[in-house]
Amino acid sequence: MNIAVGADHGGYSLKDAVMDEVKKQGHTVIDCGAKLYDATDDYPDFARAVGLKVQSGEAERGIVVCGSGVGAAIAATKMVGVRACLCHDTYSARQGVEHDNMNVLALGARIIGDELARELVRAFVNAKFNTDPRFQRRLDKVLKIEKDKS
Ligand code: RB5
């Protein structure tokens, strides 16, 4: 699976560990930056870059990192077809995919350390959407909300 990864300056310290863990799990990283630490960069730019990869299908999933994970999650999930959520527990990182077809994981580098981030990445990338009719029905309702833009 191709997984797009993006981080602003607040998430930069976690980015290498996230990308390394994605590769260790047998997946390919699409690096959406930041390639260098820049204290003046803005999280929506990286969330958008990751979201565009997911929208185009070049990446099946994405991971966005900022200081708290909140801004990156908000920005990414504004994009059509992107279902992003901030998950700092492994249950949510796994179940978010299994039940809700979450396709972008948001992390906060000022909140968690490398080892928990690696566990969260493992939970996220190894989970698969459960196509049981009740989960598909709920996903369809979510997609309808997105389509109606109400
Ligand atoms: C950047 O200072 C910080 O605001 C950003 O990384 C993120 O935490 C926003 O939610």
Image (cartoon, rainbow, N blue to C red):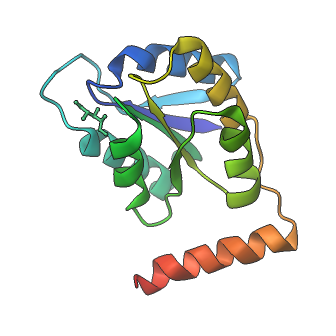
Quadrant (top left/top right/bottom left/bottom right) for the N terminus: top right
**Image position of 127 (left or right of 15):** right
**Image position of 58 (left or right of 116):** left
**Image position of 16 (left or right of 41):** right
Q: Depth check: 28 or 83 in front?
A: 83
Q: Quadrant of ligand 1?
A: top left
The quadrant holding residue 110 is top left
Furthest-left residue in this view:
40
The quadrant holding residue 94 is top right
* Residue for point 29% across, 20% down: 35
**Image position of 70 (left or right of 106):** left
* Residue for point 57% across, 44% down: 61
Image location of residue 130, percent across then percent down: 82, 57
Image location of residue 133, percent across then percent down: 85, 73
Quadrant (top left/top right/bottom left/bottom right) for the C terminus: bottom left
Q: Is residue 11 above or below residue 77?
A: above
Q: Is residue 76 above or below residue 149?
A: above
* Residue for point 53% across, 57% down: 83
Image location of residue 10, percent across then percent down: 29, 25
Image location of residue 3, percent across then percent down: 55, 36
Furthest-right residue in this view:
132
Q: Is residue 100 above or below residue 110?
A: below
The image shows a total of numbered marks equal to: 0
